[in-house]
Image (spheres, helix red, strand yellow):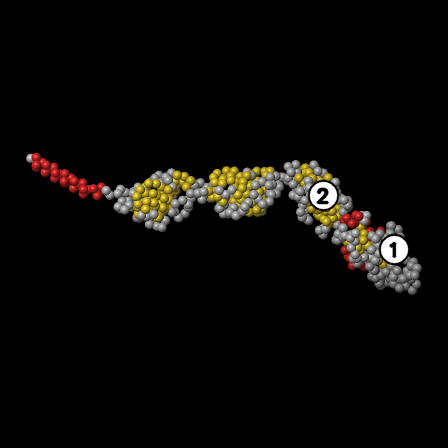
C-alpha cells in the first residue's frame, strides 16, 4: 500500500510539475501596453500653441490601425489623425509623438481620444485606448493682454516728450508687424517696425516701450494701432492687436495757440506805422529766438530778438512787436516766429511759424495818385478834331508849339481831370504819374493852370516825368528802394541797415507804378 501510494503521489507530482512547466510560457507573456506619461500632462494649462502631443508607454509599441482624435472642450472635433500617417512617429519605441496639422488656439481646452486598435506591443497585445474626455485633457496658453498702457486710454494733458508704454499680463516677444501712431485726422504720424526698429524695446519682458523719433505736437489727439502679429508670448500665442481708433487714444497737453493776429492774415491796406500783435488763448512768457519780418519776395526786412525791447507783453496773452522802422507803402510782408519764442506757464512752447502763409499782409498806399501812366486824357477827344476850336497849327498861334518865350503855363491840367502835365521845351507834355512825383519838384499845386481839352491836345504826349534827382523810389511789386541819380538812373540801396545809416526814411520813398520800369535805367548799387 505504501509503495502504491508513493507511486501515485509521485505520478501526481510529476503530472503537476509537467502542467506547471507547460503553463509557465503562457504566464510569462507581457501584459498590454499602458501609458507612463502624457505630454502635455493631463489637466495642465498654458500649453504652447505649437506643442506636439507626446505619449510615453511602459513598453515599446508599434502603430497599427485606427485614429487619434483631438476635440475641444465643447466636443467639437478639431482633427482626426490616422496613426499610420506621417503625423504620428515613434513606432517601435516607447515614445509616440503626434503633430497636429495646425497650432492650438490660445486659451482653448482640449481632450484626446485614441482607438483601441492604434498601438500593440511586440506580443500583439493592444493598448486599451482612450474613449473618455478626462484621461488626457489640457488647455492651450492664453494670449497676452494689456494690463496697462502709458499714457492710459483717453488720457489728456500728455507731455510732448512722453514715451508710449505697454505693460502685458505676461512676458512677450517681438515678432513681425507694425505699431502705428495716428493723429485724430487719421494721418499717420509714425510707423514702428517691431522686429527691426530700435525705437521699440522690451523684447522678452512684459513691458514694451515705444519711443517716437520726435516729440508729439501740443493740443493734439492721437490713437495707436498694433498689428496682431506684433507680439507673442512664450507659448506662441499672439496678442490680438489693436485695429480701431478707440482702444488706445489720448491727447497732448495744451500749448499756446494763437487766437488772432493783427494785422490779420491776408489783411490789406495796413497802416505803415502798425504794430504786429499776437493774441494767444492763454498767458505766455517770452523765451528765446527771433521774430523775422520778410518782404513777400523772401528778403528779410528785420530780425527782432524775442528778448529785445521791441517785443512786449510777456506774462500776458497779448504780445506786441514794434518794428524799428515803419513799414513801406504798398508792400506785402509775412512773419516767421521761432518755435522757442513763447512758452505757457507749463513750459510748453508755441509751435512757431515756419512758413510764408500763416501770417502775411500788405500795407496801404497813403499817397493819393493821379491817373496811372500813360495818363492819356486825349482819348475822349480825337487828337485831330474834325472841327477844332483851336487849330493844330494856327496862323497866329496863341500858344506856339515851341515858343521862344512861352506864353503857356509850365504846368497844366484839364478841368475836372486829375492828371497834371509839365509842358516841355519841345512843346510836348509829360505827365506826373503820382502826386509823390509832382511834390518832389513842387511844394504845392498853386502853379498848375487849367486849360481846355482842345488846348491840351495841342501838346504831343511824351514820356512821364521821372523822379527828381536825389529822391527815393520803389516800384509797386519790388522791395528794393532806389536813389535817383543826376543822370536819371536808379541806384539800389542794398541793405536796410545802410538805408537807416544814411538817414533815409520810408516816409520819403515814392511808390512808382511797375509800368514805369522802361523809362528808367538801373545804375550802380549803393553798398556803403
Q: Circle 2 sits in a helix, a strand or a loop, which is it? A: strand
Tell me which residue sits at (41%, 41%) in the image.
47
- Asked which quadrant contains residue 324, the reply is top right
Question: On the image, which quarter does residue 285 sit in?
Answer: top right
Q: Which residue is mark 2?
A: 305
User: Does residue 3 appear in the picture of this structure?
Assistant: yes
| Number of callouts | 2
Observer able to see residue 251: no
Q: Nearer the viewer, residue 283 or 503?
A: 503
413 vs 30, left or right, is: right
Q: Residue 253 at what x, y percent from top left?
A: 61, 39
Task: Give the left or right position of residue 367, taking residue 315 as reference.
Answer: right
Who is closer to the viewer here, 287 or 479?
A: 287
As drawn, is 187 to the left or to the right of 266? left
Q: Tag 1 or tag 2, which sits nearer the N-term?
A: 2
Residue carrying label 1: 411
User: Which element type, helix, strand or loop, lies under badge 1?
Assistant: strand
Amino acid at each position: 500500500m505504501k509503495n502504491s501510494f508513493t507511486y501515485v503521489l509521485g505520478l501526481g507530482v510529476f503530472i503537476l510539475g509537467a502542467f506547471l512547466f507547460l503553463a509557465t510560457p503562457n504566464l510569462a507573456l507581457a501584459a498590454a501596453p499602458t501609458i507612463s506619461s502624457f505630454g502635455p500632462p493631463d489637466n495642465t494649462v498654458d500649453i504652447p500653441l505649437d506643442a506636439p502631443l507626446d505619449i510615453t508607454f511602459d513598453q515599446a509599441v508599434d502603430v497599427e490601425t485606427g485614429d487619434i482624435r483631438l476635440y475641444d472642450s465643447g466636443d467639437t472635433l478639431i482633427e482626426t489623425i490616422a496613426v499610420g500617417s506621417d503625423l504620428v512617429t515613434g513606432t517601435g519605441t516607447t515614445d509616440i509623438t503626434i503633430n497636429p496639422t495646425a497650432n492650438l488656439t490660445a486659451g482653448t481646452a482640449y481632450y484626446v481620444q485614441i482607438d483601441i486598435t492604434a498601438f500593440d506591443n511586440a506580443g500583439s497585445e493592444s493598448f486599451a485606448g482612450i474613449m473618455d474626455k478626462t484621461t488626457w485633457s489640457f488647455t492651450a496658453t492664453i494670449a497676452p493682454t494689456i494690463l496697462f498702457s502709458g499714457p492710459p486710454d483717453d488720457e489728456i494733458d500728455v507731455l510732448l516728450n512722453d514715451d508710449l508704454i505697454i505693460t502685458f499680463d505676461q512676458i512677450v516677444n517681438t515678432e513681425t508687424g507694425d505699431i502705428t501712431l495716428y493723429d485724430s485726422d487719421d494721418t499717420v504720424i509714425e510707423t514702428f517696425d517691431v522686429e527691426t526698429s530700435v525705437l521699440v524695446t522690451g523684447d522678452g519682458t512684459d513691458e514694451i516701450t515705444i519711443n517716437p523719433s520726435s516729440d508729439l505736437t501740443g493740443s493734439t489727439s492721437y490713437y495707436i494701432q498694433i498689428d496682431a502679429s506684433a507680439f507673442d508670448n512664450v507659448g506662441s500665442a499672439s496678442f490680438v492687436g489693436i485695429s480701431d481708433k478707440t482702444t488706445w487714444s489720448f491727447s497732448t497737453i495744451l500749448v499756446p495757440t494763437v487766437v488772432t493776429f493783427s494785422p490779420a492774415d491776408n489783411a490789406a491796406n495796413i497802416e505803415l506805422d502798425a504794430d504786429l500783435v499776437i493774441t494767444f488763448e492763454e498767458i505766455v512768457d517770452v523765451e528765446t529766438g527771433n521774430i523775422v519780418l520778410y518782404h513777400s519776395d523772401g528778403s528779410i526786412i528785420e530780425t527782432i530778438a524775442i528778448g529785445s525791447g521791441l517785443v512786449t507783453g510777456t506774462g500776458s496773452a497779448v504780445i506786441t512787436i514794434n518794428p524799428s522802422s515803419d513799414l513801406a507803402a504798398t508792400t506785402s510782408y509775412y512773419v516767421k516766429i521761432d518755435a522757442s519764442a513763447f512758452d505757457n506757464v507749463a513750459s510748453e512752447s508755441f509751435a512757431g511759424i515756419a512758413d510764408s502763409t500763416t501770417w502775411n499782409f500788405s500795407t496801404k498806399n497813403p499817397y493819393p495818385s493821379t491817373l496811372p501812366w500813360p495818363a492819356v486824357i486825349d482819348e475822349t477827344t480825337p487828337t485831330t478834331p474834325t472841327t477844332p476850336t483851336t487849330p493844330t497849327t494856327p496862323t497866329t498861334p496863341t500858344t506856339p508849339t515851341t515858343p521862344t518865350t512861352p506864353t503857356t503855363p509850365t504846368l497844366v491840367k484839364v478841368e475836372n481831370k486829375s492828371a497834371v502835365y509839365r509842358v516841355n521845351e519841345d512843346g510836348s507834355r509829360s505827365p506826373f504819374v503820382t502826386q509823390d512825383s509832382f511834390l518832389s519838384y513842387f511844394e504845392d499845386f498853386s502853379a498848375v493852370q487849367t486849360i481846355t481839352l482842345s488846348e491840351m491836345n495841342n501838346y504831343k504826349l511824351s514820356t512821364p516825368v521821372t523822379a527828381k534827382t536825389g529822391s527815393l523810389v520803389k516800384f509797386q511789386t519790388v522791395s528794393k528802394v532806389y536813389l535817383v541819380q543826376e543822370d536819371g538812373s536808379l541806384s539800389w540801396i542794398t541793405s536796410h541797415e545802410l538805408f537807416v545809416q544814411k538817414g533815409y526814411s520810408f516816409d520819403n520813398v515814392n511808390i512808382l507804378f511797375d509800368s514805369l520800369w522802361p523809362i528808367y535805367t538801373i545804375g550802380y548799387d549803393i553798398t556803403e
